[in-house]
Image (tube, helix red, strand yellow):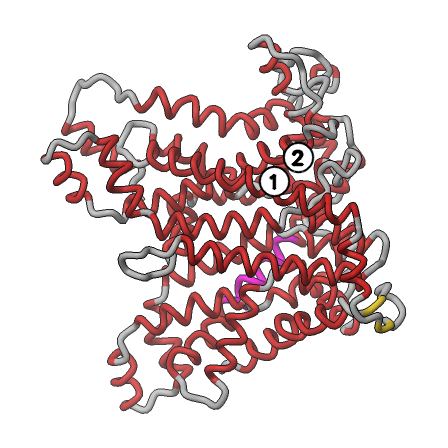
Amino acid sequence: MTTAQDAGPLRVRRPSRIPSAWHIVLIPTALLMATPLVWMLITSLSTLEETRRFPPQLPSSLHWHNYVQAWTDSPFGRWLINSTVVSTTCVISNLVLCSLAGYAFARLRFPGRRLLFFAILATLMVPFQVVMIPTLLIVKHLGLVDTLPALIVPNLVTPFGIYLLRQFFVSLPFELEEAALIDGAGRLRILRSVLLPLMGPPLSTLAVLTFLTVWNDFLWPLVVTSSPNVMTVQLGLTTFQSAHYTNWPVLMAGTLLSQLPVLLLFIIGQRFFVSSIATTGIK
Amino acid sequence: MVSPAAVLIAVFGLLPVVWAVALSFQRNDLQTPGTWVGLHNYRQLVHDPIFRDSVRHTVVYTLLFVPITLVLSLLAAAALNRRLRGMTLYRLAVFIPVVTSTIATGVIFTWLMDPDYGLINAGLEKVGLPPQMFFASPDQSLYAIVIMTVWGWVGFGALIFLAGLQGIPPDLIEAAQIDGCTRRKAFWLIQVPLLRPISGFLLVWLTINALQLFDEVYVTTKGGPQHSSTVVVYYLYQQAFQFFHAGYAAAIAVVLFAAIALITVAQLRLTRDSSTGETA
C-alpha cells in the first residue's frame, strides 16, 4: 500500500507544480463518503431542538451531555465488553485451531483426509441463514441460549480460516521442516517454532477478518440472546434505537460510541487493515 | 491435530445443514417436537404471495446493488491509485465504511433520510427538488436501501480493486504510453481487462451478500411499509422467529441456498478467463 511515505519523494521529484486535476474528482468523492459519519458526529453534539429545524444547521455549541446520557441510559459499557470478549475469544481460537487443522491438511497423511477437507470446503459455501435454525436448536440442547458462550461456540473455528491457512502452509517449502524432523522435533514443535513465525501475513489477515465479522455480526446475536446484559454492542444499539427513536442527538452519540473502538483501531492501523482485507481479495 | 476443528465443524457446520434439510420437511414451532409433512412447506411456498414478493424485491435489489457497487468501486479505485498529496485522507474517507457496522449504517441513514429534518432532503431542496419519504414510502424504501448499502460496500470494492491495480506491473502501462496510448485508454484497455479475476471475485461476493440482505432491512424498515422492502432473508426471519414456522423457514433457507449455489456457479463460468481457463 502506498500511503504517507510516498508523498515525500514525489514532492522532491516534481517541485512547484500545479495540483493534479484528480483532486477535483477526489475531494467531492471523499466528502460524499465521509458525510454520513461526519453528520453523525455533528448531530451527536447538537441539542434536540437544533435537530428539529429545516434546513438543518450546525449546533451553536458542543453538547457533550448527549454522550453522558447515552452512556448512562443503556449498558453501553457492558455491551462493549461483551463484544470485546466474544470477538477476541473467537480470534484466538481461530488462530490456534485453524493453524492446527490447516497444517494437518497441508502436510499430514491420515485416513479420510480428502473427504474431511472436501466437507469443510462444502460448509464454506453454505449461507448462515440455512444453518441458523438448527444451530439455535443445538445451542438450546447444550443449555447455552442467552449466554456469551452461545455467541462464541459456533464461531470457534471457521472453514474459511482452515482453507486460508492450508493454502499458505502448502506454499511453504517442505525443506524448512526436514531439518527439524531429522533432529527429532515433534510436529507441534515444528509448527510453533519453524512454520508459524513465517505465517505472519495470513495469520493477521485471519485475525482482522474474524474480529470484524464477529464484532459486526447481528443476526446470530439477535436470534440467540435476549437479556440486555449478554447483548453485543450491535444488538444493543438496535434496542437503544427503539428506546430513543426520535431523539437523534442521543441516538447518534450512542451509535458513535458503539463504533468508536473499531473506528479508532482502523484509523490507527489503516495500512494493516487494508492489506489484511485486500489479501483475501486476491486469493 | 485436526480433531478439535473437525469436531466443531461437524457439530456447527455439517450437522446443521442436514438438520436444516430435514426441518424443511417438517412442521416445527421450535418448542415441541416436529411432525413430518413431506413436501407441504415447498408446495405452500409456491403459492405464498409474500414469499413471491420477497423474491422479487431481492432480485430487484441485487440487480441494482451489484452493478452500481462494482462500477463505482472500480472508478474509486482508479482515482485512489495515484500518488498525490492528501491521498491518505482520501483513502480513509472511502475505506472507513468497510469497518462501519451494518447496524450503525442503518441508524445513521435513517437520520440522513428523515423525511422532515434529514440532511438529504435539505440537499434536495437546495437543488430545487421536492422532499422525499425514503424509508417511509412503499415506492422508495427498497431504493433507499440500495443507496445506503452502496455507500457501505463501495469502500470494500475499491479496496479490492486497488490491491489488484497495484499488482499490475507498471512497465505494461509505460510500454503502452510509449506506443502513444493515453492514460485513460491504457486504463480501459489494459488495466481493466487484467482485473478480470478480481472483478469476477467481487461480482460473486457482492451477489452472495446481496441475496442474503437482512441487517440493513431490520434496522431501517423492518420489511415495510406494506412489505415493500421484505427480502427473502427478512421473510425467513419473520417466519422462524415471529410466527414460529421453523419448518417453513427452513424450506425458504433451502431454496435460498439452491439459488445462491446456482447463481454462483453461473457467475464463475461467465467470468472464467477464456485465455487461461482459470476461474476468477
- Marks 1 and 2: CB-CB under 8 Å? yes
Give B164 or B224, whichever is nearer the viewer: B224
Give A269 or B26, whichever is nearer the viewer: B26
Q: Position of residue B278 (x, y in %)?
A: 33, 61
How packed is label 1: few (under 14 Cα within 10 Å), some, or many (20 or more)?
A: many
Q: Quadrant of residue A224?
A: bottom right
Q: In this view, does A89 lie to the left or right of B255?
A: left
Q: Is residue A63 above or below residue B210?
A: above
Q: Position of residue A119 (x, y in %)?
A: 54, 76
Q: Which residue is drawn at 37% across and 50% down?
A: B198
Q: In this view, does B40 lie to the left or right of A221?
A: right
Q: Is residue A14 above or below residue A203?
A: above
Q: What residue type is labelled 2?
A: Leu
- Residue B61's label in the rendered image is 1
Q: Which residue is drawn at 71% across and 19% down?
A: A47
- Residue B84's label in the rendered image is none
Q: Can residue B245 be found in the magenta stretch? A: no
Span of residues in magenta = A83-94
Q: Position of residue B162 (x, y in %)?
A: 35, 42
- Residue B142's label in the rendered image is 2
